[in-house]
């Protein structure tokens, strides 16, 4: 019986197909390096991992398509080498922040406070949107950073330094926190304008602050629902004031007569 090369073990799929696992152990940490269709490739991955851990001159940007390891594993191992912590996701830790590598050219930036979450939640990209796998569902990462799913970049929130991959709190300027509410300047005065979409945008009204505007949007949505309008509007969740105060504002606030008569 032929012995597997160093760092390689033979495994078998349910259909009987044989494949080869590459792995190594450093300290008390056992690290899986991936699965391969032949033992030579698996051993090459093992040797490459050993070189990465031994040579501090090898950097993340040195990765190429000719490498035996996947890019994700390359990042994980270099982070392990430099920071003495193994994270299964492609993360590299810096002093007060970390990088999350979607690919060699797409690098997300996060605050150190987000490390615990993203070290155990994989980020995926679909249709230009970024999601984190969270208990069987996919959560838009903007939601975690206080930006609603319906928000529009450049209107409701801004990346201060222009880098749309930089999700550090210091780089996120959230202007409009609520559905249907936009902070605008009219005749030199700042107002919070509320719009609701009914076969086109209808102006509900202008209000002095965003909480009042958010309540006005909810009232407009409720008014339309009471008239049998079938569209399911998002309702604004308002946690900054008491339920009693919300009810008072709701009862007193005026909305456009066009909504009332619709």
Image (tube, helix red, strand yellow):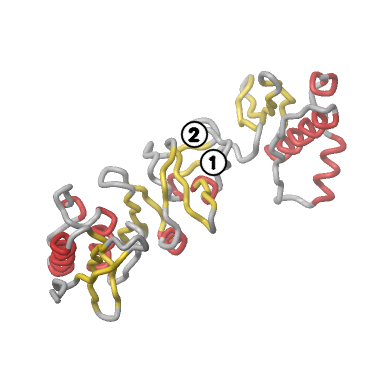
Decide which of 238, 8 is in the foreground and name it. Answer: 8
Res 215 → quadrant: top right
Side of 238 relative to 152 (left or right): right
Q: Is mark 1 on a helix, strand or loop?
A: strand
Q: How far apart are marks 1 and 2 (CA)?
A: 9 Å
Q: Residue furthest bottom?
A: 28
Q: In this view, does 152 lie to the left or right of 171?
A: right
Tell me: 246 left or right of 143.
right
The residue lying toward the viewer, choosing from 7 and 239, is 7
Looking at the image, which is closer to me, 216 or 99? Answer: 99
Q: Do the residues labelled 1 and 2 touch (CB within 8 Å)?
A: no
The quarter of the picture where the N terminus appears is bottom left
What residue sits 16% from the left and 59% below the top?
41
Question: What residue appears at the point 85 percent right and 31 percent down from the top-left corner?
Answer: 226
Mark 2 crowdedness (10 Å alpha carbons): few <14, some 14-19, many ≥20: few
Give the label, 1 or 2, closer to the camera. 2
Please state if 143 lies on the left or on the right of 231 as rendered.
Answer: left
Q: Which of marks 1 and 2 is nearer the N terminus?
A: 2
The spot of residue 132 in percent (x, y) is 47, 51
Locate the C terminus and report the quarter of the image it occupies: top right
Looking at the rendered structure, the secondary structure element under dot 2 is loop
Q: Residue beneath label 1, please? A: 174
The quadrant where residue 181 appears: top right
Give the numbered dot on residue 106.
none
Number of numbered discs on residues: 2
- Residue at image position (38%, 43%) is 165
Q: Where is residue 161 in the image (x, y as percent from the top left)?
A: 38, 39
Between residue 256 and residue 80, name the one nearer to us: 80
Residue 23 in the image, given as x and y percentages of width and height: 24, 69
Provide the residue designation for mark 2. 153
Residue 51 percent across, percent down from the top left: 13, 66
Callout 1 environment at 10 Å: few (<14), some (14 to 19), or many (20+)?
some
């Amino acid at each position: 019986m032929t012995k597997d090369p160093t760092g390689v073990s033979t495994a078998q799929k349910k259909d009987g197909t044989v494949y080869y696992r590459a792995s190594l152990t450093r300290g008390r940490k056992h690290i899986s390096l991936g699965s391969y269709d032949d033992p030579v490739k698996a051993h090459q991955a093992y040797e490459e991992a050993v070189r990465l851990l031994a040579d501090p001159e090898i950097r993340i940007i040195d990765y190429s398509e000719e490498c035996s390891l996947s890019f994700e594993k390359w990042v994980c191992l270099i982070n392990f080498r430099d920071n003495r912590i193994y994270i299964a996701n492609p993360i590299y830790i810096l002093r007060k922040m970390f990088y999350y590598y979607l690919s060699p050219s797409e690098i997300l930036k996060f605050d150190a406070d987000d490390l615990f979450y993203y070290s155990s939640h994989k980020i995926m990209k679909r249709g230009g949107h970024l999601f984190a796998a969270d208990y069987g569902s996919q959560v838009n990462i903007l939601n975690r950073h206080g930006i609603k799913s319906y928000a529009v970049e450049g209107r409701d929130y801004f990346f201060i330094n222009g880098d749309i991959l930089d999700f550090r709190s210091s780089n996120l300027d959230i202007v409009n926190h609520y559905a249907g509410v936009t902070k605008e300047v009219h005749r030199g005065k700042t107002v919070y304008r509320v719009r609701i979409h009914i076969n086109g945008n209808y102006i509900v009204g202008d209000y002095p602050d965003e909480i009042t505007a958010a309540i006005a949007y909810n009232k407009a949505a409720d008014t339309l629902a009471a008239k049998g309008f079938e569209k399911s509007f998002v309702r604004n969740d308002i946690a900054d004031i008491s339920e009693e105060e919300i009810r008072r504002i709701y009862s007193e606030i005026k909305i456009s007569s066009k909504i009332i008569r619709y």
